[in-house]
Each structure stands twice: as structure tokens, then as C-alpha cells.
Amino acid sequence: MSMQHASGSRWIERLARTGLTAKGIVYVVLGVLTFRAAFEIGGQPDQEANRCCVFQSILDVPAVAWLLGALVLGILCYCAWRFVQAFRRKAGGKKIKPLKRVRYGLSGLGYGGVAMSGFRMLVQHGSKGDQNQKLAGQLLDHRNGQLMAGVAALVLAGIGVYQVYYALSEKYKKHVQDMSREMTARGLLLGAGKTGYVARGLVWLILAFLFAKAALHANAGEAGDTGKAFSLVESSYGSLLLGVLGLGLVAYGVFNFIRVRYERIE
């Protein structure tokens, strides 16, 4: 391996580990906010348990707004790593399947939107509203808007189903292949991964349901972000399930920290 190639590989690894750390922070804070909302700890309403609220909770801490800037930069690192994965020629000596490239690219775009939300809050010190409702409104404004919104709902549902499948099939274990089999806490750490991916999949499925309602009724107001999804969970199934979902999101965030430590970045 040439020195130039080795240097490039180190930069990609740094991008990946920085990005995974930032992603882990976002999900841990989101999960904590969701758990607090479930049991009304600190007066946190479930409608505000979303990614923007994660940024706002950091921004509200006196004299540490720079932490939000660092978190946004970390999320941008994650985006960059996803795009590297999407456009690289090979991984592990094998060609990358087109669907994987699409998945990496969409992940990069999605977290790019998250980073932009955080940046706007840093500059303007305020939330920009429900992004899913805005997207639904933009789609429904087109001639075939209901069809387009329905397709978007199917995409969200597909992501949710895949996340649950990823957990139950234990494919997520490939991210921690360097974890020692003799490690005492190995089972607990892997359990955090499975729980986290299932919880994340359920959130995507709820978002898909809300988007499908918006498409069916041609009403963008029926779509919603995670805050509205969590409100639906609590009103339909109670605070206990919402609290469990919050803990699942915390577990997903923790698993990202485990990946930082044990994943072999190609």
C-alpha cells in the first residue's frame, strides 16, 4: 500500500469514526428525550422529541452553543463517509451492489438534511418546523402528488422493514467483527445493536404510516416527523411502549459508539 493510499484510508477512517460518534450522540439524546416525554419527566412533550429538539436541547445550554456546531460537523463527517461508500469502486475486494450504493447515498442525503437543520438552528436559533410535512406538501402540490407521496410512504416503509430484518437476521454483527468473543459484556453489547435496529425500524414504519395517511387524504398535515410519530405511539399504545421505544433508540445510539470502537473501516 502506498503512503498516499494509506493516508487517504486514515482520513476515511477518521471521517467514519467521527460521524458514527455524532450519530450515536443524536440517537442517545433523542432516546432520552423520548423516554422523558413518555413519563412526562421535566415537562417534555412527546411532540418535541425529534432531531431538531436534540439540537435545541444542546443550544439551550448556556455558553456551549459550540457543542451544536461540533455535532453538526460530526454529522457532516458521517455524510461524507456514506458518500465515499456509495462511490467507491470495491469493498473488501468485491464490487458493491447497486442497491447498496443507493442505500449509502440516501443515508448520506438524509443525514445531510439533519446537519442542515442543525446549522439553521445554530445560525437562526430557532426550529424550521416539521420537515416531513413540508416534503409531503411539496409532493402533493404536483399533478400526481398523491401517487408521489404514496411512493414516498412505501420507501419509508421499506427502510423500516429492512431495519427490522437487519436486526433479526443479525446482519448488524458484521459492524463489530473485531469484538473479542471472550469479552464478558459481548452479549449485552450485541443486544444493544439488535434492540436499537428494531426500535429504529419501528420509527420508520410509523413515519411511513403517517406519510401514507397524508397521501391517501391529500393532506400534508397528516404527515409528521418523529415527534408526531411518538405522539401517535403514546395515544394509541400508552406511555410504557413509548418509553420502551425511547430506550431502544438509546440502545441504537450506544451501538454506534460500539461501532466506533470495534468496526473495521475499509
Image (tube, rainbow, N blue to C red):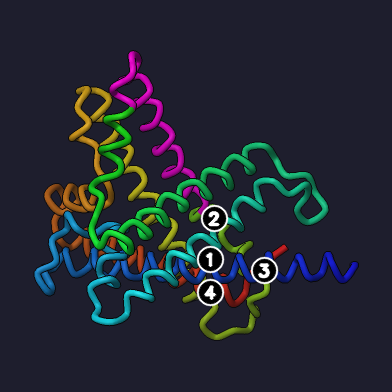
Q: Quadrant of the N terminus?
A: bottom right
Check disc 4 and report the residue beneath it.
Answer: 258
Q: Tell which circle, 3 or 4, labels the residue nearer the N-terminal end.
A: 3
Q: Are marks 1 and 2 in contact (CB under 8 Å)?
A: yes
Check disc 2 and report the residue beneath it.
Answer: 79
Disc 3 versus disc 4: nearer the observer:
3
Which percent across, then down, holds residue 135? 32, 35
Majority secondary structure of the magenta segment? helix
Amino acid identity at mark 2: Cys
- Of residue 170 and residue 175, the one placed in the foreground of this image is 175
Q: Tell which circle, 1 or 4, labels the residue nearer the N-terminal end.
A: 1
Q: Residues within 10 Å of mark 4 (few under 14, many from 20)?
A: many
Q: Does residue 55 appear to the left or right of 182 in the view shown?
A: left
Q: What stretch of residues is rendered in magenta? A: 139-166
Q: Find the distance from the CA under tag 1 to the CA under tag 2.
A: 7 Å
Tell me the element at label 4.
helix
Check disc 3 and report the residue beneath it.
Answer: 13
Q: Find the distance from the CA under tag 3 to the CA under tag 1.
A: 10 Å
Q: Find the distance from the CA under tag 3 to the CA under tag 4.
A: 15 Å
In magenta stretch: residue 149: yes
Tell me the element at label 2.
helix
Rendered position, 12 above or below 140 = below
- Of residue 230 and residue 164, the one placed in the foreground of this image is 230
Tell me the element at label 3.
helix
Quarter of the rendering containing residue 63: bottom left
Q: Could you tell me which residue is drawn at 27 percent across and 57 percent down?
A: 50
The circle on residue 19 is: 1
